[in-house]
Amino acid sequence: MEMATMVTSTERVATKKAARGKGERRAGGNGNPPQRNGGGFGGSGSGSEGSSEDRYRIGMWVALAAILMMFTALTSAYIVRAAGASDWKPIAMPRLLWASTALIFVSSITFELARKGLKRNDQQAYGRWLLLTVLFGLGFLCTQFLAWRQLVAQGVYLSSNPHSAFFYLLTALHGLHLLGGIVALDYLLLHAWRRRAPEQIGPRRAAAAGAVAIYWHFMDGLWIFLFLLLFLWR
Amino acid sequence: MAEIVDAHEAAHEAATTAHAHEVHRHPAPTSFIRKYIFSIDHKVIGIQYLLLAIFSVFIGMIMSVLMRVNLTWPGSKISILGSLFPLGAPGGVMSPEFYLSLVTMHGTIMVFFVLTTAPQGGFGNYFLPIQIGADDMAFPTLNMLSFWVTFVGLLVLVSAIFVEGNDTVAGWYANIVPSHKASGTVGPIGGWTGYPTLSALGQKAGPGQGAGVDLWILSIAIFCVASLLGALNFITTMLNMRAPGMTLMRLPLTCWSWFTTAVLALLAFPVLLAAGVLLFLDRTAGTSFFIPGGLVISDALLTDHKGGSPILWQHLFWFFGHPEVYIAILPGMGATSHILSTFARKPIFGYRAMVFAIFAIGLLGFFVWGHHMFISGMSPYTGMAFSVLTLSIGVPSAIKTFNWLGTLWGAKIRFTAPMLYAIGFVSLFVAGGITGIVLGQTGLDLSMHDTYFVLGHFHLVMGVAAIFGMFAGLQFWFPKMFGRMMSESLGKIHFWITFIGVYCIFVPMHIMGIVGMPRRYSSFQEYNFLRSLDPLVMFVTIAAIVTAVAQIIFLYNFIWSIFKGKKAGNNPWEATTLEWDIPSPPPHDNFAGILPTVYRGPYEFSVPGAPNDYIMQTEPDPAEQSTVLSKDGSNGDGHNGHKH
Amino acid sequence: MGRALAILIWLLTLGSVWLFLSGRWWFPQAITEHGPAYDRQFMLTIIVVGVAFTAAQIGLGIALWRYRSTSSTDRAVYSHGNNRLEIVWTIVTALVFISLGVLGQSVWAKLHFQPASAGAYKVQVTAQQFSWNFHYAGKDQKFGRTDPTLIKDADLNFIGLDSNDPAAQDDAAITSLVVPVNRQVELTLNSKDVTHSFWVPPLRFKQDLVPGMAIKVHFTPTKVGKYELACAELCGALHFKMKSQMLVLPEEEHRALAEMPQAQFQAKVAELLNKYPFQY
């Protein structure tokens, strides 16, 4: 997984380190076919014929870096706002959110179980656990929606106070991204149900599942972070 | 000798076997729509971005000329304005809010739809895959999406012009938002920086602050998403899809700059998106992220907001805004390095230092945003910290400049049109960058902030040097993209006029700033201390008009050459990088099914002992050339004997 | 072409330098205590920067001239660079830039790192779209209470002065800034609606007025006269017209004014504004 760790903030340092000294050894014509990616690092990608696993994995980490930056910006706005004005009146946490947390946490587990099933070519298990993951994900969104309804019933709206504004905003944005994840999961499900011979499944499906898994677990972790931020940092 | 031949054959064998089962990831499209409209081919998408940028730059330029005319001859009647926008320019005379909306839209269009599209989305999209030896970007469909989302963003922005300025369109918009009425402006009036509370209070804060701002925010948000999709592609492609032998230290500097630009975009645009969402909520949902309490506007007390901080917006905006200007200039720096080396027939001076400098600029670019905020009411201690960091970012820029000069020293310079623009870039970048040392000092910014000194500074670097990078890139890569040469003579004429013109427009602005001319004033008639500047103002405007008109030469050259330019071979410039080893224009998958193998660095010019003064990156070894291969001349349309 | 381009670059450089050195357009004369220090730092920076600019452009021109490709030139020098040179010029540049930066902090520090001295003359400034309000404490040197809810432009209570507050009885709020010469002035900057910026060029500083914040600045004017005051942060359509003036009075005249009762303050200021011409 060394590629994965290198693509976010440390990537520039990593690529610089890896590249130093490699260039010179690649003198041509000495019978050594140069490596794909010049042996810079990783090198398991093989360009256009698809090491889609690598490509999707890198792409997903890169995408997550961007999503992380957006939530970081909002978090810093949150912290500044909490420290600043006198009208900071944190709302009480709706109890339902514990259910949200449980549901998303379990969904990560079921996803991993699905992937394990895929690895040992157990189509049934893969499909089943995947379906469960989708259901738990939807369940998460339901609890979020219900929590919102509860707050509205108590008269707590987006504009009520800064804390409620951040609560609605952060949960909405997270929920939106999670919905995207559910769409991706449905895509995987659709392909899971199309029975294919094991040779045809190949690395492609595992690659896609792997990429979505990174995203899904990130959303899980993000939720836990937001949950702690909203209800511990007050 | 025989061993060398065998070894070469063995390498060739191995390489071919590895490539033999290359499969086209996507077959060539056949329908017109899939070929030219919704294409997933990075080359088509690159050209689409370029066309979008060219369209946008002309709109932005016309806006700037209108601004200059208004400042120099206040009260002048421009009849076309009067007929298009009767409310904002009654009788053809611009109102102050009309002027300010021009300022805002000029900035927004130029920064986003010109400087953040063409250098990266245009040239980068087209040439990154080819220069690293890939057949396309990592995610071609996503690439197509990123262009079309950008296009939608532009449509939304353009709609802001008419929704505010034109009664008919405003009427349509009122079907969606009943309270809307045309204000006569051509969009929002808060500047491209859109500071709250002016931008957050809606129509109460003045004309153009209603629908215009909403659509402006929406357009920028859409643009953020498009940019992120593009950045994702660039980074993944460069990390994952380099051809055999293309080590990181053999990458052309263009690739390094596109890569770093993509990283900057990836980390900066999400922050702008977050800020835009917060601003939108403040405007529409009654939140108070940026709006403090106790405001009295137009003699009415506002009771529905409190506790917010206008400075928070500035932090978020400039956290994006500063990397953004490096996003605008880095590709131009990469292109300049590339083109200077090519036409100096000399390796780039200090390749590693150049890579380091690109990284340093990229990294430091994230830590200096506060220098836009020295005067904002931010803590002065924070200001001092930002000041020191800002001055240190001058160091990698200086390194690059020294290295460009070093590249030219001892060179054998061919003064082609692309080379002229690249040289122009160096001159203009020095002129513009050097005044950053003035502005970066807190003590000096006390007077210079929000004056024309700042305008002169950033226009020279962004509005001119970066544009010259684009001109250089276009003249250089046009033959590869379109299979024909652009006219050298028209290019040179265009260069001379534009180069002189931009110096005349923007250097005097520094003087104006020193005397004290403030920014974003629709008229200078109110202040007597500005009267001494009237001759300079006139001079700048004349220069601006002449330069703007001269751009027609460029446009004509561009369009005419696509159809009637002299046909170009594979390598008309005798350059070394991978794009010059393939036909002009390239086949659908760039390398005709067989990916190249790279044996050397990108700037091997004037190598002692080599038969030509350039060696292509795909060339195995000069010693072998004479034994194994028979070369067919140096005009570059052979494969240097390395036939597949 | 190389020679022509070199000459063009040198001419443009010459023109640019001339613009700066001609003396025809420059800062207005500084009228504050920190002004000379500002001007010195600016001069130093512009000279360093100007030398660098000129040297680079001259160097560029020389390279173009000398190394243009002619039939007699053989090949370019095959060199990938020079590490020692890189290190040298990196260090030199860093030293020069950082030194400039450090030197430049002293003006900033003097203005911003220390609060106003105890005897400073205080004025409350409240900006609005599109005018300035200067609130003077009057003879009792105490500012009357202000409250946004009391603001009513239509009744000419632009700053929301609470007339019931005894301290407000001698306060005056007018559109011009009047200060004494050779005495430190402390301004507290507020805004009613959007961000504005207080700027009088001869003062050699500007400061944003941010709604929701009360920002203090201080300076010591050193020259009597009347000066134009401009808004330096885009605040709406009439931003260009948000004009006022600053009047720096001799000590005696100012003291007399400062002790004047509310009813006569405005008229006296109008008289004084007429008396002194603008300095540009």
Image: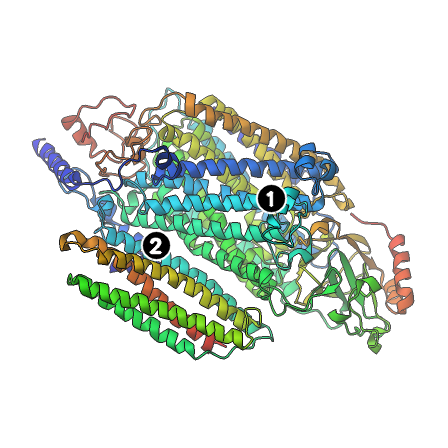
Q: For mark 1, does the 10 Å Cα neighbourhood hold few (<14), some (14 to 19), or many (20 or more) residues?
A: many
Q: Which of B324 and A10 is in front in this view?
A: B324
What kind of element bears circle 1?
Answer: helix
Query: Element under label 2?
Result: helix
Residue placed most toward the observer, B44 or C168:
B44
Q: In this view, does B384 lie above or below C240?
A: below
Q: What residue type is labelled 2?
A: Arg
- Picture mark count: 2
* Structural distance between the alpha carbons of marks 2 and 1: 41 Å
Residue at 44%, 47% in the rendered image = B149
The amino acid type, in three-letter code, at marker 1 is Ile
Q: Where is residue B167 in the image (x, y as percent from the top left)?
A: 66, 43
- Displayed quadrant of residue A194: bottom left
**Left or right: B209 as drawn, with respect to A115:** right
Q: Quick check: B643 left or right of B636?
A: left
Residue bearing the label numbered 1: B161
Above-or-below relation of B621 to C170: above
Look at mark 2 in the image and give the residue it sits on.
Answer: A12
User: Which residue is painted at 48% across and 45% down in the image?
Assistant: B152
Q: Is residue B78 left or right of residue B289?
A: right
Farthest-out residue, front? B175
Instruction: Specify whether residue B154 is in view.
Output: yes
The colour scheme of the drawn protein is rainbow
